[in-house]
Amino acid sequence: MASTVAPLNVDVVAVNTTTQNSNASTATKAFNPVVCYSPMMMTTNGMWQDEGVNPLEFSLPLFIVQVAVIVITTRLLVLLLRPFRQPRVIAEILAGVVLGPSMIGQSELWASLVFPVRSLLTLETVAHLGLLFFLFLVGLEMDVDVIRRSGDKAVFVAMAGMALPFCMGIATSFIFRHQVSRNVHQTSFLLFLGVALSVTAFPVLARILAEIKLLNSELGRTAMSAAIVNDMCAWILLALAISISEVDSTALSSLWVLLAGVTFVLFCFYAVRPLMWRIIRSIPEGDDVSNAQITLILTGVMIAGA
């Protein structure tokens, strides 16, 4: 029997909300879409038993088709980009562009058949799980002590790599502020666009360095250290932009997120890391890690990602 676990279709309900304009005496009405999900069957009883039933209306066959399409498209782009000596992550990014709304996704038939809205939640969940464990593997291959020894060099590289794109983002925001940010705080928009153009995608950088075997080289350690500093600065500036643009409650929440992140990092360094070292030392030389220890580690990774 099939089980109900995911949405089948999407009903958009217009909710009438009233917004008060401080400079006018009348209220204007806006319609905010509310997405309602109805149950979706997990899997079919088979193509031959359920005649006339589209397998793509069920979550598991649809997910398998989506993964197959993504993998095949990525592999084809890898082959096409191989003569140009491009890393695989570039092909994966281009595959997202090709399959997304920028190109093939503009077709309503393709979007509704292969990548319907009801399936995106499942696809994004699996993608984030993959990213979570990939970053965990990257962390296993990194030597924190070596990165720490990069010191001033990493900070200088991060600041130098962030300064020019940040200034370009601010300059661009002056050009597009009337089209994009009509009702947005000007200073907040400047900071947000500057951060968006200057931040280094840590997972992408780690993937490129790991693929070309430079993750533990001097260049790779400097690049990863600079990326960490870059990400820290980006999150601080982003929290500042949110604090400037929103009300006090949102400003306090952004500050809380920043403090919670710092607390989590300190907890990992001073509590989780010694525990991991204790587990490693408890394993006799030549023995494998037990299933219980692997389960504990992987569970901790998922809890950390939550």
Image (cartoon, rainbow, N blue to C red):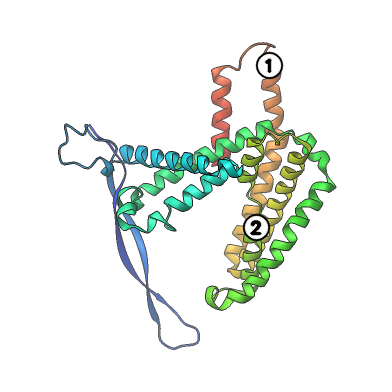
The residue positioned farthest toward the front in the image shown: 83
Task: Please state if 78 lies on the left or on the right of 117 as rendered.
Answer: right
Q: Which residue is mark 1?
A: 282
Q: Residue at x 76, y 41 (%)?
A: 219
**52 sits to left or right of 86:** left
Q: Residue at x 55, y 44 (%)?
A: 81
x%, y% of residue 237?
Answer: 68, 60
Q: Nearer the viewer, residue 71 or 119?
A: 71
Q: Where residue 238 sits: x, y (%)?
A: 64, 60
Name the residue: 69% across, 62% down.
Answer: 165
Q: Is residue 11 left or right of residue 94?
A: left
Measure the alpha-carbon separation of dots 1 and 2: 40 Å
Dot 2, how many residues are within 10 Å of its Cα: few (below 14), some (14-19), or many (20+)? some
Q: Looking at the rendering, which quadrant does residue 73 occupy?
A: top left
Q: Is residue 275 above or below residue 150?
A: above
Residue assigned mark 2:
255
